[in-house]
């Protein structure tokens, strides 16, 4: 008997023909643990948080935050998001990791074996990360919507 989700949500378990993977990244050919394995949620969040803190600190060098003034904080937060974009997109595009990812020991890798992530993939990943939900909703391989849309996966560097 077909599941009621089969028409719009297919995948592992939809028809019972494919067994679930034993670890995240197994069906992608990635190791279970160590270098090159799929990064866990804690490392990913730690890297993201480190990038946000760095962007806020850089922004604070140029704009003084005032927690009592809503307009000042609105402009500070907008500037901090722009700094975060400027900090993360080129780094991910050309090096495969952001400063926060480097601290967390993770990097972005292309599934097609490309050397660099590339500018368009980094821009799409960044835009979808700003929306939060695409980055938070992950599949069995620990890949968010932003990873699936760009053909990337976040793996451990150490």
Image (spheres, rainbow, N blue to C red):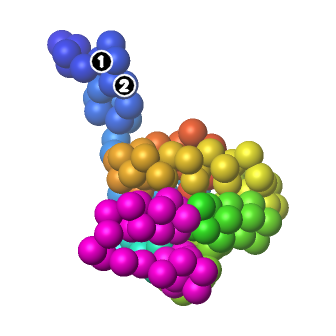
* Secondary structure state at the residue bearing disc 2: loop
Q: On the image, numbered disc 2 is attached to which residue?
A: 10
Q: Can residue 35 be seen by looking at this rendering? A: no
* Secondary structure state at the residue bearing disc 1: loop
C-alpha separation, residue under disc 1 versus residue under disc 2: 5 Å
Name the quadrant containing residue 6.
Answer: top left
Q: Residue at x 48, y 53 (%)?
A: 129
Compared with 22, 100 (above or below) is: below
Q: Give the quadrant of the N terminus.
A: top left
* Residue 45 placement (x, y as % from top left): 39, 70
Q: Is residue 69 magenta?
A: yes
Q: Is residue 42 magenta?
A: no
Compared with 97, 26 (above or below) is: above
* Residue 88 placement (x, y as % from top left): 63, 67
Q: Residue at x 46, y 43 (%)?
A: 145
* Residue 26 placement (x, y as % from top left): 48, 56
Q: Which residues are magenta?
A: 55-81
Q: Nearer the viewer, residue 121 or 31?
A: 121
Q: Give the quadrant of the C terminus.
A: bottom right
Q: Residue at x 36, y 78 (%)?
A: 66
* Residue 128 placement (x, y as % from top left): 51, 46
Crowding near the residue tagged with mark 1, few <14, some 14–19, many ≥20 C-alpha atoms within 10 Å: few
**Principal SS element in the magenta part?**
helix
Q: Nearer the viewer, residue 1 or 92?
A: 92
Q: On the image, numbered disc 1 is attached to which residue?
A: 6
Residue 97: give its label: none
Compared with 147, 51 (above or below) is: below
Name the quadrant containing residue 86.
Answer: bottom right
Q: Is residue 102 left or right of residue 27?
A: right
Dots 1, 2 in contact, CB < 8 A: yes
Name the quadrant containing residue 99.
Answer: bottom right
Q: Residue at x 36, y 46 (%)?
A: 133
């Amino acid at each position: 008997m077909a599941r009621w989700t089969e028409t719009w949500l297919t995948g592992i378990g939809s028809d019972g023909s494919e067994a679930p993977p034993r670890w995240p990244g197994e069906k992608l050919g990635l190791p279970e643990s160590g270098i090159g394995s799929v990064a866990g949620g804690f490392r990913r969040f730690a890297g993201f948080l480190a990038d946000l803190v760095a962007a806020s600190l850089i922004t604070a060098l140029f704009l003084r935050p005032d927690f009592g003034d809503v307009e000042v904080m609105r402009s500070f937060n907008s500037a901090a998001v722009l700094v975060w974009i400027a900090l993360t997109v080129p780094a991910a595009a050309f090096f495969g990791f952001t400063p926060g990812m480097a601290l967390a020991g993770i990097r972005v890798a292309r599934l097609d074996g490309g050397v660099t992530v590339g500018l368009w993939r980094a821009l799409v990943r960044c835009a979808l990360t700003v929306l939060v939900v695409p980055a938070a909703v992950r599949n069995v391989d620990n890949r968010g919507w932003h990873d699936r849309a760009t053909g990337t996966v976040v793996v451990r560097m150490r």
